[in-house]
Image: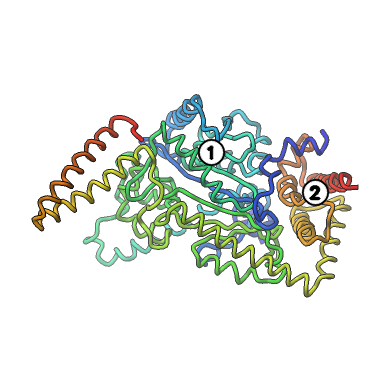
Amino acid sequence: MICQECNQRPAALHFTKIVNGETTEVHICEKCAQGKSDLFMDNGGSGFSINNLLAGLLNIESNFQHPKANSFPKTEEVRCPHCQLSFREFVRIGKFGCATCCETFNKQLIPILKRVHSGNTAHIGKIPKRIGGALHLKKQLAEMKDTLKTYIDQEEFEKAAEIRDKIRALEKRVHAQGEGDES
Amino acid sequence: MSLEKFLQNALSSWMNHEGPESDIVLSSRVRLARNFKDYTFPTLFSHEEAKSILELIKKRLESEVNSEIGQLEMIEMEQLQALEKRVLVEKHLISPKLVDESTHGACLLSDDEVISVMINEEDHVRIQCLMSGLQLEKALQLANILDDWLEEAIDYAYDEERGYLTSCPTNVGTGLRASVMMHLPGLVLTQQINKIIPAINQLGLVVRGMYGEGSQALGNIFQISNQITLGKSEKDIVEDLTSVVQQIIAQERAAREALVKTSNIQLEDRVFRSYGILSNARIIETKEASTCISDVRLGIDLGYIQNISESILNELMILTQPGFLQKYAGGPLRPYERDMRRAALIRERLNLDTKEHS
Ligand SMILES: [Zn+2]
Ligand SMILES: [Zn+2]
């Protein structure tokens, strides 16, 4: 067996990667393996699958589009305003160019994220302490405003006044956090 | 230089501590991928941007680091020689990608080499904590402390809905990759591993192994890590992985027990044959060395071999790699010279233990 990286030397190492039940065999020579054989580093592995996955998705999408190409906007034309990466380039390299890419490709990204993360698209983990403080409060504020509306609709004005005061106090805190570190 | 002294300098001091379940779990690793707000990601950033990322970190280092973190030393890739970089890769402190592809790449290392932070690799920052045995929660705790310390001064690329934004869509969300290295000779010998791997995959975890000819994992070592970074909290990711690992440990222990019961003498024979090869071979390739080292480690765990320290598997797996062999030899080696060196180093290492005990 010949090394599939350089197509020259005989393959000495046979690397098997299993992701979600899909087995990928990689046969490479010792020289080419030096860069890849590091089991501890996750980036040696994830690159392969994400590129294949993205390429596959683009193919599927363009196949679907083909019959009525006119009624769909061409997804390949989308370009990130910050780093200039096009969706097509993103699919080819499998990497975002900047934080804005995520927003730019949001629509096309959702099926990709779902595939990679078992159907999930929303982060429910850590919130950065500094930016996060305001985020937590913002969320809380939105919920309280909902409650306020409910109370007003139900004409429970005493409770409404109570929560309105709380909202005002919270808004002050959000404002203060925007200016300096409070937590 | 004597081997003893070389070992002291060569091996990360975290390896001296035997973590929980360290007879089966060689090490635990946690990695957090982070990027800085308003900077292009490393795949596309300019030299200037790469440099300013480095400057931001340097500036942050000027201020006090949390006492739990201790001193961090910054090493820029440009300052290192090829062999030095290779040794860092073989110690799993940095990736080949940081060495080969980064612009203004650097790493921060703690004294005990538990913490290594890669700068300007695939993401602006990759915080990594590496500990012996099964200690994912502790490793995550430490990574979080360092993460918070960086975030105190630097704005991260973070989206309310998607979480931490990373170069690769596979890391978006928590940016967390938790992984453990497991030595599973019992499950391999009883051929249960082929059934267990698909079951682990079903749980959203990834299993990797280095395979030699005949598809036997090199040294019976497997890495298990989380696949999903979105829709699950860091705590859940680490807890779920830990509980799967604990089940695998239980199965590995059961397999070993069954082996001892059913084929004690065959197993003992296998262990001592491998011990014989390691203590006598003059030329040994990676694959054979890995197999024999795995057997000897199993022999230690089962009590067949008493005068050799358990850390030998962790140590030799790292020390018998080309970069380390050349560092020990003090110069470049051809492949056949490496095989000779490897054999010599293993013999010396075994001698070190038996001398101490006699
Ligand atoms: Zn090759
Ligand atoms: Zn972009």
Disc with the residue nearer the chain's start (2 vs 1): 1
Provide residue B168's location: percent of width, then percent of height.
44, 49
* Disc 2 versus disc 1: nearer the observer: 1
Q: Under tag 1, what secondary structure?
A: strand
- Using the image, determine if residue B95 lies above or below residue B313: above
Identify residue type, mark 2.
Asp
- Provide the residue designation for mark 1: B118
Q: Is B4 situated left or right of B210 in this image?
A: right
- Residue at the farthest left position: A155
In the picture provided, is A98 more to the left or to the right than B190?
left
- The answer to whether mark 1 is within 8 Å of ligand 2 is no
Looking at the image, is B297 positioned above or below residue A41?
A: below
Identify the residue at the far right of this view: B358
Q: Which mark is residue B339?
A: 2
Please indicate whether residue B121 sits to the left or right of residue B212 in the image.
left
Residue B170 in percent (x, y) is at 45, 53
Against A21, is A10 above or below? above
Residue sitting at x 57%, y 31%: B72
Name the disc covering residue A16, or none: none
Q: Is residue B349 left or right of residue B84?
A: right
Residue at horizontal 74 percent and vertical 55 percent from the top: B290
Figure disc tally: 2
Q: Residue furthest front?
A: A158
